[in-house]
C-alpha cells in the first residue's frame, strides 16, 4: 500500500560530496489525446503500480496504469453513495486495493473497490468522534487501519470498516497540536506523519503499542515461585494495564486487573495452577483495549 498524503517534489538526500540525487522525468498524465482533468487535489498508487487521481473539478476518481493508460473512472457531483462535492483531496489505497477517499465537503470517508464499486462510508459534519470538519487527508496502515486528517485540528483513526478507534490533536502550535492538518501518511512501522499546514511543519507520532518481553516463549516457570512479567510500551498507551494468563488462547487467570504501565509486574504462580506447556501472557491497556500484546510463543508452568 502506498498512500500519497504528503507530496515530495524532488529529493533532499545528500549524495557523496554535497551533490543531490537527481530524478529523471518519465511521463505525464494526460498526454496528447488522453482524457483531461479539472483541478487535481490528490493521487495514490496501489501495490500493482496503478495510479488513482482525485479529479475534483469533475467530481470523480480516475484510474490509470503506471504508464498513464486510462483504465476506469467513477463518481459524479452530489452527496449520494459514490458521489463527491467540491475539492476533495485525500486518497489512499490499502494492501487489498481498496480505495479510500476523503470526501471533504460531504464530511465523510468513502471506501471503494479497486474498480470503483462503492463499499461503505462513514462520517458526518461535527466535532464528535467519527465526525469531521472538512477532512483533507487519508492514509492506511499495513493492518488496514485508516487515519484521517480532520479539519477539527486532529487526526482520527478508524478500522477498515469505519469503526472509530482513537483520536489526537487540538488547535495550536505546541507539540501534538495542529493548525489545519491537511496531509497524513503512515510508514511500515505504523508511525504517523502529519502535514501541519499553517504551522509550516511536519509532525511525527509514534504508533502506540505494548510489547510483551517476558515470558515470550520457551520459559519454564515453577508453581509456587515468584517471577517477573516484563513488557515495553511506546506512545500513549495509558497509565494502567491488565495482565492475563492464557492457556490454549483462552484467559484462565487475571494476574493483575489494573497495574501501573511501568514495564514490570512480579507474580507468584499459585501452587494450584494447572501444569502445562501451552501458556501465554497477554497485556492490554485499561484505557484502550486496542493497545495490547500477547507472548509470541508458549511458555511452560511446571
Image: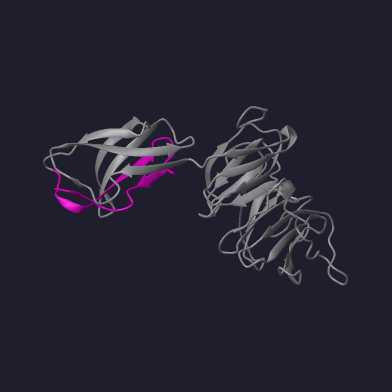
Residue 161 horizontal/vertical position (percent): 54, 54
Whether residue 288 is in magenta: the answer is yes
Region rendered in magenta: 273-302
- Residue 219 placement, left or right of 161: left
- Viewer-closest of 42 and 213: 213
Q: Is residue 81 visible?
A: no
Total number of numbered discs in the rendering: 0
Residue 50 horizontal/vertical position (percent): 68, 66
Q: Residue at x 19, y 53 (%)?
A: 277
Q: Is residue 246 visible?
A: yes
Q: Residue at x 25, y 33 (%)?
A: 266
- Viewer-closest of 102 and 191: 191
Where 229 sits versus 105, above or below? above
Q: Residue at x 67, y 28 (%)?
A: 173
Residue 131 horizontal/vertical position (percent): 62, 42
Q: Among all residues in the image, which is located at the extreme front?
A: 17
Q: Residue at x 71, y 36 (%)?
A: 180
| Quadrant in the picture for residue 241 | top left
| Quadrant in the picture for residue 184 | top right
Where 237 sits versus 100, above or below? above
Residue 281 horizontal/vertical position (percent): 29, 45
Whether residue 277 is in magenta: the answer is yes
- Residue 193 placement, left or right of 230: right
- The quarter of the image holding the N terminus is bottom right
Colouring chosen for the image of the structure: one colour
- Residue 277 placement, left or right of 184: left
Where 269 sits versus 250, above or below? above
Q: Among all residues in the image, which is located at the extreme right?
A: 32
Amino acid at each position: 500500500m502506498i498512500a500519497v498524503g504528503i507530496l515530495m517534489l524532488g529529493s533532499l538526500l545528500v549524495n557523496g560530496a554535497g551533490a543531490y540525487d537527481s530524478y529523471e522525468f518519465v511521463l505525464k498524465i494526460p498526454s496528447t489525446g488522453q482524457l483531461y482533468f479539472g483541478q487535481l487535489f490528490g493521487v495514490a498508487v496501489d501495490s500493482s503500480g496503478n495510479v488513482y487521481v482525485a479529479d475534483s473539478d469533475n467530481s470523480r476518481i480516475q484510474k490509470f496504469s503506471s504508464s498513464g493508460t486510462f483504465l476506469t473512472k467513477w463518481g459524479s457531483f452530489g452527496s449520494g453513495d459514490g458521489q463527491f462535492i467540491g475539492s476533495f483531496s485525500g486518497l489512499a489505497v490499502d494492501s487489498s486495493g481498496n480505495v479510500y477517499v476523503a470526501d471533504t465537503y460531504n464530511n465523510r470517508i468513502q471506501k471503494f473497490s479497486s474498480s470503483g464499486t462503492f463499499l461503505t462510508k462513514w462520517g458526518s459534519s461535527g466535532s464528535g468522534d467519527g465526525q469531521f470538519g472538512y477532512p483533507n487527508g487519508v492514509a492506511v496502515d499495513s493492518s488496514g487501519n485508516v487515519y484521517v486528517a480532520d479539519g477539527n485540528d486532529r487526526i482520527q483513526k478508524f478500522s477498515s470498516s469505519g469503526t472509530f478507534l482513537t483520536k489526537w490533536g487540538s488547535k495550536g502550535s505546541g507539540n501534538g497540536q495542529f493548525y489545519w492538518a491537511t496531509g497524513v501518511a503512515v510508514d511500515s512501522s505504523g508511525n504517523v506523519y502529519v502535514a501541519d499546514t499553517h504551522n509550516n511543519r511536519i509532525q511525527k507520532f509514534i504508533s502506540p503499542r505494548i510489547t510483551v518481553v517476558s515470558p515470550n516463549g520457551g520459559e519454564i516457570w515453577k508453581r509456587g515461585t515468584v517471577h517477573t512479567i516484563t513488557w515495553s510500551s511506546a506512545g500513549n498507551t495509558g497509565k494502567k494495564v491488565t495482565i492475563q494468563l492464557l492457556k490454549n488462547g483462552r484467559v484462565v487467570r487475571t494476574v493483575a486487573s489494573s497495574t501501573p504501565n511501568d514495564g514490570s509486574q512480579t507474580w507468584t504462580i499459585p501452587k494450584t495452577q494447572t501444569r502445562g506447556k501451552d501458556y501465554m501472557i497477554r497485556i492490554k491497556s485499561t484505557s484502550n483495549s486496542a493497545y495490547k500484546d500477547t507472548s509470541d510463543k508458549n511458555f511452560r508452568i511446571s
